[in-house]
Amino acid sequence: DDASQPWGLKILRVDIKDITPPQDLVDAMGRQMKAERDKRATILEAEAYRQAEILQAEGEKQAVILEAYARKEAAFRDSEARERFAQAEAKAIKAISIAINNGNLQAVNYLIAIRYMGSVNRLATSDNPKLLLLPLEAAGIIGALGGIKDIIKNAAFAKKI
């Protein structure tokens, strides 16, 4: 507009029908566009990799937390089971003590026989190869197991009364 005003002309609009830039400029613009696309692709790939690593780390962290919680729960349940077993043992020993005070030695024989058979069972079912030798007194202990029947009968009879 400044160039045409001294001549008394007012230009309202200019239409450019065709521009043919030099080939080296076209090539440079093409390389620039390709570089921009490559840059965006690289940034997107890096961001995706970063997100994947973060999610992987968070998953591993959660797994460690859950595993620790499970170990804690298992330890708690084991301690409760040991406590209940100890209470049951104490109750059984108290019952045996009362039976001994009342002159009932069959209860002692029963306790010894049960403990002995439990030990033999654990020894026989262990994974280690072994030769299981029972002492001659084993026959006496096994005979004491026959007395268990009488103890159970007497206990059942005492409950009925």
Image (cartoon, rainbow, N blue to C red):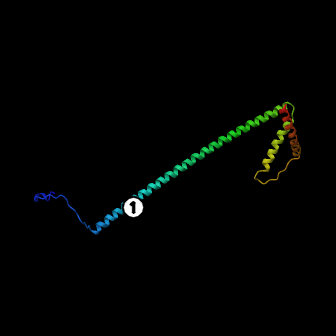
Element type where label 1 sits in the image: helix
Residue at the spot 12% in from the left edge and 57% down from the top edge? 5
Give the quadrant of the N terminus. Answer: bottom left
- Of residue 98 and residue 19, the one placed in the foreground of this image is 19
Residue at x-position 54% and y-position 50%: 59
Q: Which residue corresponds to mark 1? A: 38
Asked whether, in this view, residue 120 is left or right of residue 23, the answer is right
Q: Amino acid at mark 1?
A: Asp
Q: Residue furthest bottom?
A: 23
Rendering quarter of residue 88: top right
- For label 1, the crowd category at 10 Å Cα-Cα, with few meaning under 14, some 14 to 19 and many 20 or more, is few
Q: Quadrant of the C terminus?
A: top right
Left or right of 66? Residue 5 is: left
Q: How many marks?
A: 1
Residue drawn at 81 percent across, 42 percent down: 115
Q: Give the percent coordinates (x, y) of residue 146.
A: 88, 42
Side of 131 relative to 5 (left or right):
right
In the displayed structure, would residue 140 be above or below residue 52? above
**Residue 91 sits above or below residue 4 on the image:** above
Farthest residue, direction left: 7
Picture residue at 34% right of the left edge, 64% below the top: 31
**Nearer to me, 22 or 89:** 22
Estimate the x, y position of residue 8 in percent, counting from the top left: 10, 58
Whole-percent x, y for residue 76 in the image:
65, 40
x and y percentages locating residue 117 in the rendered image: 82, 45
* Outermost front residue: 12
